[in-house]
Amino acid sequence: MSSLLHQRTSIHNPFTNQFPFSPPSSTNSMKRISIFSPITLLVLLSLIVVFGVFSPWVDIPPGIFSASEPAISKWRHYTLAQALPFVANNGTVIVCILSQPYLAFLNNWLISITRQNRQDMVLVIAEDYATLYKVNERWPGHAVLIPPVLDGEAAHKFGSLGFFNFTARRPRHLLQILELGYNVMYNDVDMVWLADPFPYLEGNHDVYFTDDMTTIKPLNHSHNLPPPGKKGRPYICSCMLFLRSTDGAKLVMKKWIEELQLQPWSRTKKSNDQPAFNWALMKAAKEVDLYLLPQAAFPTGGLYFKNKTWVKETKGKHVIIHNNYIIGFEKKTKRFRDFGLWLLDDHAVESPLGRL
């Protein structure tokens, strides 16, 4: 795409005057043409109409019209139905959903996935045009935007209405992927892969997920949905999922959407998507084949980053590390650095996006 833009800059500019006017002289009887003459205005109007008709199909260099708005490009019209077959491997895709402030975490996550040779399966669902263009500029075809566009700046603070609106779109995006016939692994980008997770997706279950509790389970623990806790529901993490394109997985997504509608955000009850997901799992459990992934391979951040003894005892078994149980970009980045998991410092070139 960058080469295309380079080529476009060398194309003749239709607004450039190839025949500059010479100053009046005694030998030059040519009259000046007023910019307000009927002929000039007609030419300008024609150019505006032509540009308006053809601009949606033309890649325009960033910043040519506005320094604050991303340029119009073909990626604005890139659809999920077009993106999925481009990235899918054997009918399966890896998906994350993010806005521009999370780009550094995206890049860190991508380095770890590239080390497992799974990067070609990744599709970034961008929640703003800046992310859509940045990813596709560096890595064409690997980002798509599903309208409408939310206010990305409002989605940063955990517990805010913006955060709720941002995360509440997740089951709709995932359901759309399933309905298009693809299996999907979803990850939050504050994760790092230490090994390939796909060998752990045993059997042909509908929905695979991880426990967000810090209580240590035996290595041979049950893979059934854990029993409800004090709040009447289990505490499953909605940040790492694998869904097969089955009626059961679609049912869970639909129930998740319903639960989010039943439990909207309010100032007194600052909801997020995870409780709704757990209620959905409970209500669908008798109709859907659910599978709890092994804790040693997929530990919550509240266990991995806080229990050194457990980490030592389970060394070599860890697959995906989730940097949760902590809030804030700076705090998450520091903790990743403290544990040698902020790969961007020394290995940014390993990411498909390179250094951002």
Image (spheres, helix red, strand yellow):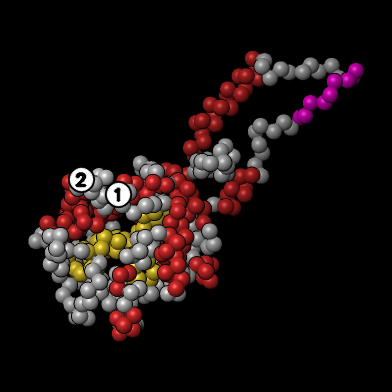
Q: Position of residue 183 (x, y in %)?
A: 27, 60
Question: What kind of element bears circle 1?
Answer: helix
Evaluate if marks 1 and 2 touch, with contact meaning CB atoms under 8 Å apart. Answer: no
- Farthest front residue? 268
Q: Position of residue 37 (x, y in %)?
A: 67, 15
Amino acid carrying mark 1 in the image: Phe
Identify the magenta region.
Answer: 19-27
Q: Position of residue 125 (x, y in %)?
A: 38, 53
**Above/below status of 22 relative to 272:** above
Front residue of this view, candidates 354 and 176: 354
The answer to if 328 sits in the magenta stretch is: no
Seen at 32% across and 65% down, the residue is 325
Taking the image as drawn, is residue 22 in sight?
yes
**Above/below status of 171 relative to 65:** below
In terms of secondary structure, what is the magenta stretch mainly? loop
- In the rendered structure, the answer to whether residue 283 lies left or right of residue 159 reads left
Seen at 32% across and 69% down, the residue is 301
Callout 1 environment at 10 Å: few (<14), some (14 to 19), or many (20+)? many
**Disc on res. 261:** 2
Taking the image as drawn, is residue 171 in sight?
no
Callout 2 environment at 10 Å: few (<14), some (14 to 19), or many (20+)? few
- Please name the residue that numbered disc 1 is placed on: 164
**Above/below status of 183 relative to 345:** above
Please identify the quarter of the rendering in which residue 285 is found: bottom left
Front residue of this view, candidates 60 and 96: 96
Q: Position of residue 353 (x, y in %)?
A: 50, 60
Mark 1 or mark 2, earlier in chain:
1
